[in-house]
């Protein structure tokens, strides 16, 4: 049983290192940047929807919202 585990871990780490080694630092920076941009978009969209629902439920807040945002 121990040999199977050691073998599986060895193959896993070999594949993992091969995967990370296949991409350059610039590639990783691009992947991380795109991921962060998508995450930021999703968070902003979530809070915009939340604000919109709040304004629909409380129309008296619309004037305050418009004063704050511009």
Image (cartoon, helix red, strand yellow):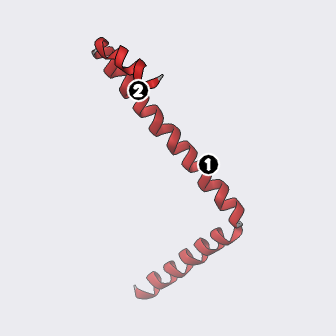
Q: Quadrant of residue 48?
A: top left
Q: Which mark is residue 49?
A: 2
**Residue toward you, 50 or 68:** 68
**Residue 13 falls left or right of residue 67:** right
Q: From what the image shows, is residue 63 above or below residue 68?
A: above
Name the secondary structure under disc 1: helix
**Residue toward you, 42 or 13:** 42
**Residue toward you, 63 or 13:** 63
Q: Quadrant of residue 61?
A: top left
What is the x, y in percent for residue 32? 59, 55
**Residue 53 falls left or right of residue 5:** left
Name the secondary structure under disc 2: helix
Q: Quadrant of residue 27?
A: bottom right
What is the x, y in percent for residue 15? 60, 72
Please tell me which of labels 1 and 2 falls first in the chain: 1
Q: Which mark is residue 54?
A: none
What is the x, y in percent for residue 29? 65, 59
Q: From what the image shows, is residue 3 above or below residue 63?
A: below
What is the x, y in percent for residue 41? 52, 38
**Which residue, given by chain and number where applicable, does mark 1 sit on?**
34
Going by the picture, which residue comes out furthest to the top?
Answer: 59
Residue drawn at x 64%, y 68% as measured from the top left: 19
Residue drawn at x 47%, y 32% as measured from the top left: 45
Q: CA distance from mark 1 to mark 2?
A: 23 Å
Going by the picture, which residue comes out furthest to the bottom?
Answer: 3
Residue drawn at x 41%, y 26% as measured from the top left: 49
Q: Residues within 10 Å of mark 2 (few under 14, many from 20)?
A: few
């Amino acid at each position: 049983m121990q040999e199977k585990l050691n073998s599986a871990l060895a193959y896993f780490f070999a594949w993992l290192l091969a995967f990370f080694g296949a991409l350059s630092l610039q590639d990783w920076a691009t992947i991380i940047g795109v991921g962060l941009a998508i995450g930021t978009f999703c968070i902003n969209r979530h809070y915009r929807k939340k604000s919109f629902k709040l304004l629909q439920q409380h129309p008296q807040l619309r004037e305050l919202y418009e004063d704050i945002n511009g």
